[in-house]
Amino acid sequence: MLLYLINPSNPLINIVKVKESRWNRYRVWQPLGLMVLAGLTPPEWEVSIIDENLGLPDYESMPRPDLVGITAFTSQANRAYELSGYFRNLGVPVVLGGIHATMCMEEAGEHADSIVTGEAEGVWPRVLDDAREGRLKSVYEGGRADLSDIPLARHDLLDGRYALGSIQTTRGCPLNCGFCSVTAFNGADYRQRPIDDVIREFRTIRERLVLVVDDNLIGTQPEHIERAKDLFRAMIAADLKKEWVAQATINFADDEELLELASKAGCSGVFIGFESLDPDKLVDLGRKFKLMKDRDFRSSVRRIQRHNIMVVGSFIIGLDIDEPGVGRRIAEVADRYGIDNLNALFLTPLPGTRLYDHMKADGRIPLDRFPGDWKYYTLTFPVARYTHFSLDGIIREMDACNESFYSMPKILRRVWSHLWRGRKPFLSLVGNLSYRNNVRMGHKAHADFRRRVGSRLD
Ligand code: B12
Ligand code: SF4
């Protein structure tokens, strides 16, 4: 029995040409959900993972599979449905799963033979049995998995074209920010995989650089932090020889021992959501608010960097509290905090979030011809109506933010400061230039966006 597991590309944002340049490998990330699914698949199935972000395969010349499983973030939904249509026309049953199918069950159900909602660990073997016997159900509810005994993800099934490996050590986030779907999808209960499993899986990763995909690697409660320390100790003892980056909340900075262990265990960078210039006023920040209130962000960032860990900070543009001038102010504040890279994103009502419900109720989502419009839900396009900005106004804020933070003099200053402090100046240069390049491509993408859908947003 042949199974294809497909990660669809979003042609709108898929600017990746891995074959043309090795540097482009740094823009392609492994589809870990599919690798986990492959790990859950019994050996009588021959599994092939197809990542369209590495280049579109010639499906016609490939053997006809017995079953196709497709994953999708919201921004990939259109391509997922297109692919599903192609295989169903050939008479091959298709199962859709992942975040978008879960949040938009009805819509996804119209494009597949079956959908799996939530985490797949509890239901995937049953789906495969039913598929083999030709009695697939239209919906399987996966719910949330018990992580104490799950098979390892199949890292061996991917080829060597990725720059970064990937692994997950925890699921769930108790903080429940209004604009994020993680708590709705993975739950508020912070679940941790057994440390031995994580170490065993790390050993199967061939890449030296690894993305730890956890939404919050260290958690928020003292027992979460203790577990993170135990994990780092085990990684050090295992001498994994990996360098890794992860996502965490700013309380990462509050424990020197944690930082020291993380660094020794190979941590070289951390993505932190700062979200707003005024977190104190951001009512819908959920419980994250407490971690940010009255914090001296500059010293927090410095404490992390002192351990040779880069800080990538993310901010949202378009919050109701944001006023004209916010783009430039974010760049200034990010500079003042001393972060190494800035990732500014438009406030985007993703399905399944409280933000979506509020904006929908207020008639503030003009790009709502779904599924077609989902392709713009990449957080890099302003798909909603923003309280204090017109379409052109909010794009100008984004441009001002990026142009200021990624101006050449500021990049050179950051690189110099890395050199002076004995931190990796080359990495800083490459990271900054790559973001600067993205910003240039963003201009073109926004002009195109304006032309295609601007009249619906004005
Ligand atoms: C790593 C990551 C990335 C990586 C990409 C990884 C990849 N797969 O390509 C990078 C950094 C590139 C990225 C980019 C983006 N991301 Co992202 N990302 C994540 C993150 C943190 C982890 C994903 C992961 O690997 N999880 C681990 C695996 C094991 O879990 P899983 O994928 O959910 O898979 C399980 C189930 O969903 C299910 N399943 C999944 N697929 C399928 C398929 C079938 C057939 C079946 C049966 C089951 C099934 O089974 C798996 C095992 O239980 C998630 C948050 C999260 N907790 O998931 C956000 C998340 C998925 N990202 C999100 C977003 C918004 C984006 C961006 C649009 C934002 C941006 N501009 O940065 C881009 C767009 C990328 C795109 N392709 O269009 C949102 C998606 C919301 C949505 N409705 O789409 C999430 C949920 C975060 C959030 N804050 O809300 N992301
Ligand atoms: S802390 Fe991060 S993962 Fe958790 S709900 Fe907020 S944005 Fe989502």
Image (tube, helix red, strand yellow):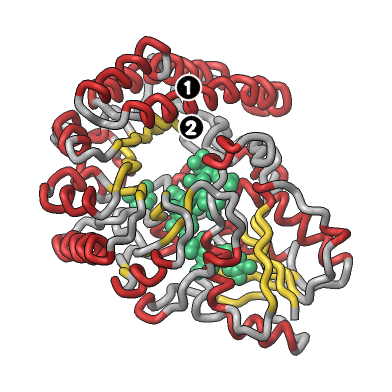
Which circle's residue, 2 or 1, is located before the other in the chain?
2
Q: Is residue 137 above or below residue 376?
A: below
Residue 17: % across, % down: 67, 38
Residue 150 image-quadrant placement: bottom left
Compared across the picture, whether 98 is left or right of 375 comes to: left
Residue 132: % across, % down: 74, 86
Query: If the image is split into quadrants, where does the C terminus sit?
Result: top right
Type of amino acid under label 1: Met
Residue 69 image-quadrant placement: bottom right
Q: Secondary structure at mark 2?
A: strand
Residue 398 is tagged as 1
Nearest the camera: 223 or 30? 30
Residue found 77% across the figure and 57% down from its top: 83
Residue 174 is tagged as none
Question: Residue placed farthest to the bottom in the image?
Answer: 133
Q: Secondary structure at mark 1?
A: helix
Disc 1 residue crowd, few under 14, some 14–19, many 20+, Cα 10 Å: many
Nearest the camera: 354 or 175? 175
Judging by the rendered image, the residue that carries numbered circle 2 is 346
Nearest the camera: 401 or 277? 401
The answer to whether residue 360 is visible is no
Count of numbered circles on the image: 2
Q: Is mark 2 within 8 Å of ligand 1?
A: no
Residue found 18% across the figure and 32% down from its top: 302
Compared across the picture, whether 21 is left or right of 321 comes to: right
Q: Is residue 165 above or below residue 119?
A: above
Residue found 48% across the figure and 32% down from its top: 346
Q: Is residue 85 above or below residue 9?
A: below
Type of amino acid under label 2: Phe
Question: Residue placed farthest to the top in the image?
Answer: 409
Residue 279 image-quadrant placement: top left
Query: If the image is split into quadrants, where does the N terminus sit?
Result: bottom right
